[in-house]
Amino acid sequence: MTKYLCIEGVEGVGKTTQTQKLVDHLRSLGYKVLQTKEPGTSHSPLTMELRNIMLNSKYELEMTTSARELISQAIRSIHLEKVIKPAYDKYDFIIQDRGLLSGFAYGEACGNDLHWMGGIGEHIVYQSQLSGLNLYDMVILLTGSVEAGLDKAISSKQEFEAGDAIEMKGLSFMNNVNANMVAYSSRFNTTSINVDGKNVDEVFADILNAINIRGNHGS
């Protein structure tokens, strides 16, 4: 049976690095792994086009709070129906960078109503014929210094020439997102791992301990 794991956290906390390390490790053990992410995945070019509209500061003057959320939910709909659903029974693991927890945390920080977002999200998951809002077997929430993470994110990546609309909302916004993530993590089967004072390998060891993977596949 496929295990569906989602790695979460605010900007710069190390999600992408740890996602890649976990994928590489599981593949080295002989597991078949689908690596994906939200919002926007290389497995679906359309979701990447929508990601650009959603996050590129180039469109910020025209963007509205509701419009950004609806684009986010459209990306999730495409991702679940066209990427995740067909992957079940074909992979041992689906490892995802960001998911519903980020959707709730960032969406409410942007000014959207949690109940409204949850209703849309529930409908999308239902339409995909997956297993409800608690569709992940485990969510791994990486926590740490929000300020340090935001500084790291801004300095280390430049996905959009005009800037990332969410990162540009600043530290107060990101603190709100972080608080939302912690508060809403109880909606999922979540294991929280604090990254402060730890190097990449130490955090990864904590993740492996949380998911309890031992030895080679089939051994």
Image (cartoon, grey):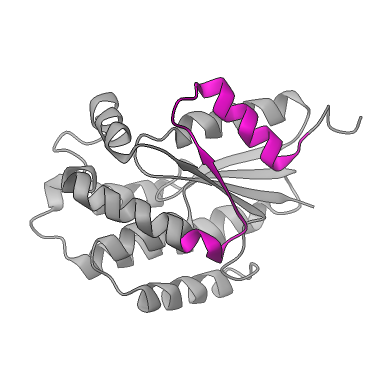
| Magenta-drawn segment | 184-213
Check the image and report above or below for 120 versus 186.
below
Q: Residue furthest front?
A: 197
- In this orientation, which residue lies closer to the viewer: 17 or 52? 17
Estimate the x, y position of residue 206 in percent, counting from the top left: 62, 33
Query: Image point 31% across, 75% down: which residue?
Result: 113
The verdict on residue 206 being magenta is yes
Q: Is residue 166 left or right of residue 20?
A: left
Q: Quadrant of the C terminus?
A: top right
Q: Quadrant of residue 204?
A: top right
Check the image and report above or below for 132 versus 161.
below
Q: Quadrant of residue 187?
A: bottom right
Q: Quadrant of residue 24?
A: top right
Residue 216 makes an appearance in the image: yes
Q: Is residue 179 left or right of residue 15?
A: left
Estimate the x, y position of residue 193 in percent, counting from the top left: 54, 40
Estimate the x, y position of residue 31 in percent, counting from the top left: 76, 34
